[in-house]
Image: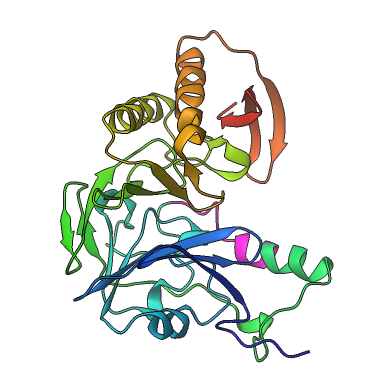
């Protein structure tokens, strides 16, 4: 049965008034924060569906795209948008946002996704041509530093520099709603990926110390990440567990095994069921 590339390909859920969670494929998450004057989309998925059409059907204000970092599953449809912003450390040497922006480790990921998706017998949008599937670059994104405030009209977002997974990983904080959009600050299966190019376990520990302090101060009560359901209330105890795990890694006081990943060998730690991958 044909599947269109907007509402049937994406799974869209209202998190709160004016905030939407958008899932593409199995767990590639994006978030839309709607305001009276402008809306902000956090991340752009893997680029299979028509993300811009979906978003424009949800809001009637201009849309700015905020990228948490440059990895392939966050920039997929970035080129569909006119106003794209990303941390200055996430751009390529030429100032672009691109699949080969800072390393070549993600060049094969789109094809790998398609291969696994089709092997599982899962459908793709009607009219999607797998042979033409490509993640187009954004030539002139606006660079961010992690201390900006964005006025949506009736609500604001603040950018936070949260490195560790990637040098310029950003989060976006809505103090009024108590929501933090965290990108890959916590990765698949509630774990941490620190084994990719630019990963830094020491920076990650500082990020988790900052997140815990913000949580304890009541600044946010909900953490929205790309690859997990929302962390709300008591579920935010995961910040303590992962902070403790990162500290044990830094101190050399944690057991690990060397495992093979899609990006080569890595050290795999586990803390309370959360896997943490670092360079071997």
What percent of the width, then of the height, locates residue 87? 27, 53
What percent of the width, then of the height, locates residue 219? 27, 38
Residue 110 in the magenta stretch? The answer is yes
Q: Residue at x 72, y 36 (%)?
A: 260
Q: Residue at x 36, y 46 (%)?
A: 169
Q: How is the image coloured?
A: rainbow
Closest to the observer, 191 or 163: 191
- Magenta part of the chain: 103-112
Q: In the displayed structure, would residue 178 be above or below residue 52?
A: above
Q: Is residue 205 left or right of residue 88?
A: right
Closest to the observer, 11 or 139: 11
Image mark count: 0
Q: Residue at x 47, y 55 (%)?
A: 71
Q: Main secondary structure of the magenta part?
A: loop
* Occupied quadrant, residue 268: top right
Q: In the displayed structure, would residue 29 be above or below residue 273?
A: below
Q: In the displayed structure, would residue 55 be above or below residue 266?
A: below
Q: Residue at x 38, y 24 (%)?
A: 202
* Occupied quadrant, residue 25: bottom right
Quadrant that contains the C terminus:
top right
Residue 268 in the magenta stretch? The answer is no
Q: Is residue 50 left or right of residue 55?
A: right
Closest to the observer, 67 or 236: 236
Quadrant that contains the N terminus:
bottom right
Q: Is residue 92 left or right of residue 229?
A: left
């Amino acid at each position: 049965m044909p599947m269109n590339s907007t509402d049937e390909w994406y799974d869209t859920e209202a998190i709160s008034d004016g905030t939407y969670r958008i899932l593409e494929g199995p767990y590639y998450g994006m978030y839309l924060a709607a305001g009276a004057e402008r809306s902000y989309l956090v991340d752009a998925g893997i680029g299979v569906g028509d993300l811009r059409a979906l978003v424009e059907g949800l809001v009637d204000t201009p849309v700015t795209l905020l990228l948490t970092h440059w990895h392939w599953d966050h920039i997929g449809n970035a080129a569909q948008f006119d106003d794209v912003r990303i941390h200055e450390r996430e751009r390529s040497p030429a100032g672009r946002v691109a699949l080969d922006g800072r390393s070549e480790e993600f060049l094969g990921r789109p094809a790998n996704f398609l291969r696994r998706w089709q092997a599982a017998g899962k459908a793709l949008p009607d009219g999607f041509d797998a042979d033409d599937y490509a993640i187009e670059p954004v030539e002139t994104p606006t660079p961010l530093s992690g201390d900006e405030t964005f006025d949506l009209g009736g609500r604001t977002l603040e950018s936070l520099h949260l490195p560790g997974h990637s040098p310029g990983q950003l989060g976006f904080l809505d103090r009024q709603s108590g929501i933090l959009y965290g990108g890959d600050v916590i990765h698949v299966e509630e774990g941490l990926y620190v084994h990719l190019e630019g990963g830094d376990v020491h920076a990650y520990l500082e990020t988790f110390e900052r997140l815990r302090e913000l949580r304890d101060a009541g600044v946010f009560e909900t953490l929205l990440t790309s690859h997990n359901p929302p962390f709300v209330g008591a579920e935010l105890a995961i910040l303590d567990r992962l902070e403790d795990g990162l500290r044990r890694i830094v101190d050399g006081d944690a057991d690990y095994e060397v495992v093979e990943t899609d990006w080569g060998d890595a050290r795999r730690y586990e803390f309370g069921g959360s896997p943490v991958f670092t360079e071997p």
